[in-house]
Amino acid sequence: MSSTPSTSALDPEERRAIVEAVRDFTEARIAPNAVAWDQAHHFPIDVLAEAGGLGLGAIYAKEDVGGSGLGRSEAVLIFEELSRGDVAVAAYISIHNMAVWMIDTFGTDEQRSRWVPHLAGMENLASYCLTEPDAGSDAGNLRTTARREGDEWVLSGTKQFISGAGASSVYVVMARTGGPGPKGISAFIVPAESDGLSFGAEEQKMGWHAQPTRQVVMDGVRVPAENLLGEEGQGFSIAMRGLNGGRLNIAACSLGGAQWAVDRAAEHLRTRQAFGGPLTDQQGLVFALADAHIELQAARTMLHDAAARLDAGDPDAAVVVAGAKRFVTDAGWKAANTALQLHGGYGYLAEYGVEKVVRDLRVHQILEGTNEIMRVIVGRALTQGTA
């Protein structure tokens, strides 16, 4: 079992080539379909498989099981590009990668070789199952249970707000195997075909229409003992370490989506005529555009610093990541909302795509740990002198 973080030592040209390949794929296969997928609530499984063929299904998993072996610094560049095409699709790819990384990092050699290769190619999809109806931000008090019966674990409970539920082949589930609190939680690999596994109705959401969100219900689901991921009682730690990368990725998705919207707003100001000239003659509008751009530049710098620290194994990385997640997702939604305002009434029309980005980005301030919890993490580190 390995717990060493995946890192890479790519030179600038290699990174640029990766970004350009992802950009080409996004422009060809994702961006042209984003509005239609949103309106139809369509989950583009076929396009996800194509993304897997490019190595995007296991970005920072190790190469011996089909991963791309990249670092978090490359991942944030990738997710920024993907989200310029469709925030919801990019965010699902992030969640899939988080689950794959957990199996690759904490799994046995047998688990890694069995599960990761098919997930890496995204012919099989993965979901991350931590949140519960009564345990959202307070994940350490989750109620899903797993009890040992001979050579099996028996899982019972309900997970809430699970991206990909019903479409995924693998569910990484956190369940209670011991006493109360985080130390009583373990992680399990649960195949979709398991008896007793079912799903709630698809949630009707404000955004993220291009990926399904449903409850995952376990009623006496039996999995082999070897499906325990990591050590018994290690599940909460595994989940939190997975979230470090997830928070970076979701911040990158906010950044990419917002940058796309701001770029569209700049084009609108250049081409829209009003009051006898282009809107660029209206200084107040130009100032609003400039402020949005500056905020995103600051967010990008903060995000890249946090990714580099996580790659380097910095002991303060979790706190830095939490701060970056809070700042970048707040800045991204604010910038996208500004872009909508700068479009005037056109920004409210679905065909322009900006209102979709605003809707999609709003949830990034909630998931992977609410931004209030990010403040708790940073504030606690400051008051305890550990930041």
Image (spheres, grey):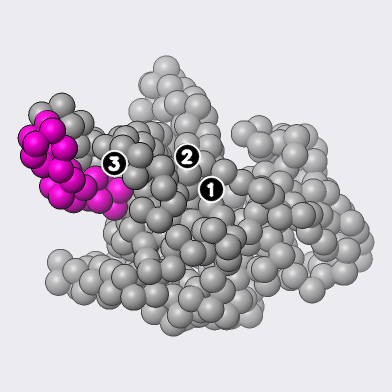
Q: Position of residue 241 (x, y in %)?
A: 51, 49
| Residue at (31% x, 37% y) in the render | 344
> Could you tell me which secondary element the residue under label 3 belongs to?
loop
Above or below: residue 387 compared with residue 104: above
Residue closer to the observer: 13 or 264? 264
Above or below: residue 386 compared with residue 348: above
Q: Estimate the spatial distance between the alpha carbons at disc 2 and disc 1, rounded to whole Å.
A: 8 Å
Residue 369 visible in the current orientation: yes
Report the amino acid beneath label 3.
Answer: His
Q: Main secondary structure of the magenta part?
A: helix
Q: Nearer the viewer, mark 3 or mark 1?
A: 3
First in sequence, mark 2 or 3: give its number.
3
Q: Left or right: 208 with respect to 227?
A: left
Q: What's drawn in magenta, residue-wise?
A: 259-282
Q: Nearer the viewer, mark 2 or mark 3?
A: 3
Residue 122 visible in the current orientation: no
Disc 2: which residue: 362
Q: Position of residue 226 (x, y in %)?
A: 75, 70
First in sequence, mark 2 or 1: give its number.
1
Disc 1: which residue: 207
